[in-house]
Amino acid sequence: MTSEGKTNERTGAAPRKGRPKAADDAERRKHLIEVTTALFLEHGYQGVTMSKIAAAAHVSLNTVYRLFPGKPDLFAALVGEHRRSMVDLPGDYDDLPIAEALERIFFVNLDKAAEQRRFGLAQMLVTEAERSAELGEVFLGEGPAYTHKLLVDWLTRQHDLGRIAIEDAGTAAKMLMDIAFGAPGSHRKGALMWEGMQERNAHLKICFAIVARGMAV
């Protein structure tokens, strides 16, 4: 009879104490997303196969398909990861002043290296989304549309708590996205050029302070 801490009577080997399968799969998913991100950035979506992903991640092809039934599912996971690097929601900011909460939600104090990583991934995701209607829908659903919903939910909660006064949470959420995601303008031709991340972050802080005053009760 085999029990934890005793040898297996048939094999003579001690039983392995493995972690729960769910935890293992969560780590595998994270690793696959990291590997896929690097491959997509280097070769593009069309230049990467599920087999190539499995080989680069050092896992079986069956494991890749079990965790991500298709390449669009991996693309969706990448969009989700990028969204979380852009907006820190859901989250508990109820004890913070609204302006400070917005700074944290939109990662105002991001450093240059992190911003470059975000921008590089965003460029790739947008490019691939524009090439395929299927990926375009995935990008919209997991990216901008999901971000908008998270912001609407947060703004509605702040309104219900009596911390802000807004007439239309949907419009307010879109305005915040325009402010935050339009700020790294140095990446777009003809747009406002920032000398560095300090200028970009200072600009956002001023914008969010103005917004907070405008929503004050």
Image (cartoon, rainbow, N blue to C red):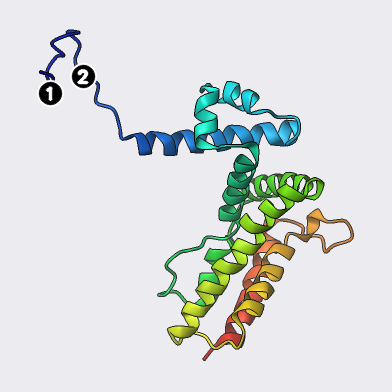
The N terminus lies in quadrant: top left
Q: Is residue 215 visible?
A: yes
* Label total for image: 2
Q: Residues within 10 Å of mark 1 (few under 14, many from 20)?
A: few
Q: Identity of the amino acid at label 1?
A: Ser
Q: Is residue 12 left or right of residue 47?
A: left
SS at mark 2?
A: loop
For the point 50% across and 33% down, which residue is it? 66
* Residue wearing tag 1: 3
Q: Position of residue 131 (x, y in %)?
A: 81, 46
Q: Is residue 206 visible?
A: no
Q: Position of residue 71 (x, y in %)?
A: 64, 37
**Is 131 in front, or is 210?**
131
Q: Is residue 164 left or right of residue 142?
A: left
Q: Residues within 10 Å of mark 2 (few under 14, many from 20)?
A: some
SS at mark 1?
A: loop
**Is 62 in front, or is 55?**
62
For the point 59% across and 80% down, which residue is it? 169
**Is 140 in front, or is 10?**
10
| Position above or below: 53 against 132 | above
For the point 60% across and 88% down, which residue is it? 167
Q: CA distance from mark 1 to mark 2?
A: 8 Å
Q: Quadrant of residue 49?
A: top right
Q: Which mark is residue 15?
A: 2
| Position above or below: 145 against 134 | below
Mark nearer the N terminus (1 vs 2): 1
For the point 42% across and 74% down, which residue is it? 94
Q: Position of residue 148 (x, y in %)?
A: 62, 67
Assess whether mark 2 and mark 1 are in contact (beta carbons under 8 angstroms): yes
Q: Identity of the amino acid at label 2?
A: Pro
Furthest residue in direction right, as rendered: 190
Q: Is residue 3 left or right of residue 141?
A: left
